[in-house]
Amino acid sequence: MTVVDVRTTAETAFLDAVGSTLPGLRLLTDPLDRESYRRDETAYLTSGLPLAVALPTSTAEVAALLRLATEHRIPVVPRGAGSGLSGGAAGVEGALTIAFTAMDRILAIDHADLVAVVQPGILNAAFKAAVAAEGLFYAPDPASYEICSIGGNIGTNAGGLCCVKYGQTRDSVLGLEVVLADGTILRTGGRNVKDVAGYALTALFVGSQGTLGLVTEATLRLRPAPPPRATLIAFFPTLASAGDAVRAIGEAGVAPVTLELMDKPTIEAVDDWHHLGLDRTAAAMLLVESDVAPAAAIDELDRAAAACERAGASSVVRAADATEADWLRQGRRLALRALERLGTVRMEDVGVPRGRVTALLEAIDEIARRHGVRIATFGHAGDGNLHPNFVFERDDPRAEALTEAARADLFRAAIALGGTITAEHGIGTSRRSALVDQVGPDAIRVMRSIKAALDPLGILNPGKVL
Ligand SMILES: Cc1cc2nc3c(=O)[nH]c(=O)nc-3n(C[C@H](O)[C@H](O)[C@H](O)COP(=O)(O)OP(=O)(O)OC[C@H]3O[C@@H](n4cnc5c(N)ncnc54)[C@H](O)[C@@H]3O)c2cc1C
């Protein structure tokens, strides 16, 4: 089949200008190539075919592209590895997608300052491995760490499996190089652990999903490598008892590095795939890890185990060794993929204050029953962040309508519990209409003012977030 491209005069002039200004730039214009940049991991959301896809190798190229985009009024979509779960990197019809895959170098690892300087395209796992080889640790740890980039993590303020102890991506970003819509190259922050000079611009760009500027370099906070982890899993007869254990672990003053939850449908899906010998009769399980020195880790897990038992755990099991612990953690990381073996999955990302996990679990259960939908829930329970997944037969024509109705109730429930409609995946396009319900019209007005100040023509990732 031949695809006929119909371009506007402005689009043609823009592509010509890119070609003549940056003759060495890798620019994909073939429709089939562009098609593979249409979506992120949210295949069910509406997306557009990019006009072209640029794969720059330097900040100078990114700045030149944005100057031309401003001049020709062409929208720009920044893209990392495309693993996002809110449509943030999804294509926009007639827009230039700038994919950072080829800007993936580590520019410095500094043991004295405990920082690294990286380009945005490096994958989280590759970066983690490089600093680990030098006896250091980069904390942010999304379950997708093998397939997501640092730039995308900054774009979404990614969370993951050890936020409960080390915070979200924002807590590990000390400085940024950002290219603004008009091509200005801005530096924010730096290597200082403490820095209160003016407004917190670094924090503002983290999580802005490419709507305020394009990150071309990041200075990231490192830590000395912690000891190997000690791991336990606890099984519970009810969802409420698992939620109560999350609260009890916090109240006991235990600070685990990982506190993850999987409900029964997730346990079964993970176990069907990986045969980990999980208790399939349980309503939920918690995965608890400690990364303090071995003697202290035994004490930390003893206290976590006691808290689980007080909350009503049916069994508490310690991982026999590091390999078993790795399998359990990997099983949790692959929970989404395990559910995807059952059908089409639409994943949500609500959060509540940690003490209200039980109430959120009960609300999810009630919503599933009321709407007659199958929901499998797992998530970062220690952060109060749960991922209810709507699971449908492939090609179920009711999937969209049922999801929309159920997730409207889910958002309402999270907000009523003092929580959030998205804890780590971002608003993107998928949750845009619900944002005002959480933050209110005044906050939306302030956000719009910031957007207008940084991107007056509205060319950066239009239709995302606001
Ligand atoms: C199996 C699976 C598990 C996951 N687990 C987690 C998890 O535990 N925690 C979590 O937080 N997320 C998780 N995610 C979601 C996703 O991996 C994260 O949101 C991740 O941060 C996206 O990174 P990416 O490189 O794929 O970015 P993309 O999806 O390409 O982009 C994400 C956003 O960042 C913007 N962006 C990308 N690069 C730049 C840049 N250089 N400058 C400015 N903006 C930019 C994009 O425009 C987009 O809005 C998971 C996804 C999958 C598929």
Image (cartoon, rainbow, N blue to C red):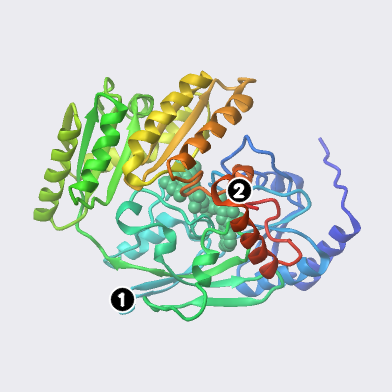
> Which residue is found at the position 65% from the left and 70% from the top?
180
Residue density around tag 1, few if under 14, some if 14–19, many if 20 or more, within 10 Å = some
Question: In which quarter of the view is residue 219 placed?
Answer: bottom left
In the image, residue 183 above or below residue 270: below
Closer-to-camera residue (461/253): 253
- Judge from the rendering whether residue 94 lies leftward or rightward of residue 44; answer left or right: right
Identify the amino acid type marked 1: His
For the question of whether residue 349 can be seen, the reply is: no
- Judge from the rendering whether residue 297 lies leftward or rightward of residue 80; answer left or right: left
- Judge from the rendering whether residue 462 lies leftward or rightward of residue 418; answer left or right: right
Expressed as whole percent of the image width and height from the top left, the position of residue 280 reads 28, 22
Identify the amino acid type marked 2: Val
Where disc 2 sits, the SS reads helix
In the image, residue 97 above or below residue 422: below
Where disc 1 sits, the SS reads loop
Question: In which quarter of the view is residue 26 placed?
Answer: bottom right
Nearer-N-terminus badge (2/1): 1
Marker count (numbered): 2
Is the C-beta of the residue carrying label 2 under 8 Å from the nearest atom of ligand 1? no
Expressed as whole percent of the image width and height from the top left, the position of residue 354 reads 33, 45
Q: Residue 436 got which mark?
A: 2
Closer-to-camera residue (30/253): 253
For the question of whether residue 361 can be seen, the reply is: yes
Expressed as whole percent of the image width and height from the top left, the position of residue 373 reads 51, 21
In the image, residue 96 above or below residue 392: below
Which of discs 2 and 1 lies nearer the camera? The answer is: 2
Q: Residue 111 got which mark?
A: 1
